[in-house]
Amino acid sequence: MEWKLRQDMDVGTSNPIVARTSLGLFEIIEFSSLSKDKKEDLKSSCYEIMKLLVLAEKNAQPIIEEIERILAEISKVGISTQSHGRCINVPSALNIEHSRSFIKYAKQVLQKVAENINIIFGKSYNGPRFDIIRDDFVKEFGNDCIVTKLLIDDQLWIKEIIDLRNEDEHPKTGKPYCSNFDVNRDKDGRVIVTLPKFFNGIQIASGLKAYSYNLLTFAEEITAYSLLKFFPKIATIYEIPEDQRNIKAPIRFRIGLTTDGITK
């Protein structure tokens, strides 16, 4: 019998996504009182979340960097023209259509987070219906539960991602999914630069930045804080300050005593 090794990704534990959604969460999963089968299912789901987040990041970064590079150039030299100012050279971000792939992976992350909730609490939510999940958690655990608070606070950006994915899959607005840079003049002749945006007006660069941060944080916190329900009373998790995290594996959460960590 031969062993087979295959590299799954080109990033390692120094990547915060990898460290936080695998090493960090796996430790918390193992410490919980979930059954062995549930632990394995949850680890598998977290591993899929990790891969999806890495793919999302790989699609987002070139778009963000290109837009920021163009803005820096505009700030430095302005907008160029031809034919004595009668023709404006409008800058173009060539990568913005790849934002569709980011949104696809983002929705899949949300689906897996809902699956984590199903595994931990024995639920059967069908997809990322976090409005329904929120309402159920309010009824079952109350507004003071830390997971309930997350589900309440994060509704807006979650809905934005779902709406963006739905429009990509089933266009209804009749608008271009992505609009590139545009340049116009106001009534006084001043140049007005419009940034690339989605069909709903959300700026692409700032939107992708926010969604990337929110997805990792939400996936990690929902999973970790949900598992607190399955911790011994004296145990909780605490957050390692960002400047104190190991650069080789920047895990965010560690297990500690209740007096030192996060209120359940």
Image (spheres, rainbow, N blue to C red):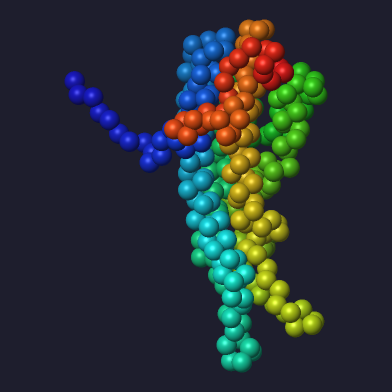
The image shows residue 199, relative to residue 47, as above or below, that is below
Q: Which residue is at the far top?
A: 233
Q: Residue at x 59, y 71 (%)?
A: 76
Q: Residue at x 41, y 35 (%)?
A: 12
Q: Position of residue 251 (x, y in %)?
A: 52, 28
Judge from the rendering whether residue 172 lies leftward or rightward of residue 90; answer left or right.
Answer: right
The image shows residue 27, relative to residue 197, as above or below, that is above
Q: Position of residue 158 (x, y in %)?
A: 68, 41
Q: Which residue is at the far left?
A: 1
Q: Name the quadrant containing residue 97.
A: bottom right
Q: Name the quadrant containing residue 252.
A: top right
| Residue 125 visible in the shown view | yes
Q: Position of residue 230 (x, y in %)?
A: 62, 12
Task: Looking at the picture, tell me which residue is in the foreground, 30 or 115.
Answer: 30
Judge from the rendering whether residue 166 lies leftward or rightward of residue 186; answer left or right.
Answer: left
Q: Position of residue 66 (x, y in %)?
A: 53, 61
Task: Looking at the picture, tell me which residue is in the foreground, 208 or 4.
Answer: 208
Q: Name the quadrant containing residue 83.
A: bottom right
The image shows residue 76, relative to residue 177, as above or below, that is below
Judge from the rendering whether residue 167 lies leftward or rightward of residue 143; answer left or right.
Answer: left
Q: Which residue is at the far bottom?
A: 84
Quadrant, the C terminus: top right
Q: Residue at x 75, y 28 (%)?
A: 149
| Residue 223 visible in the shown view | no
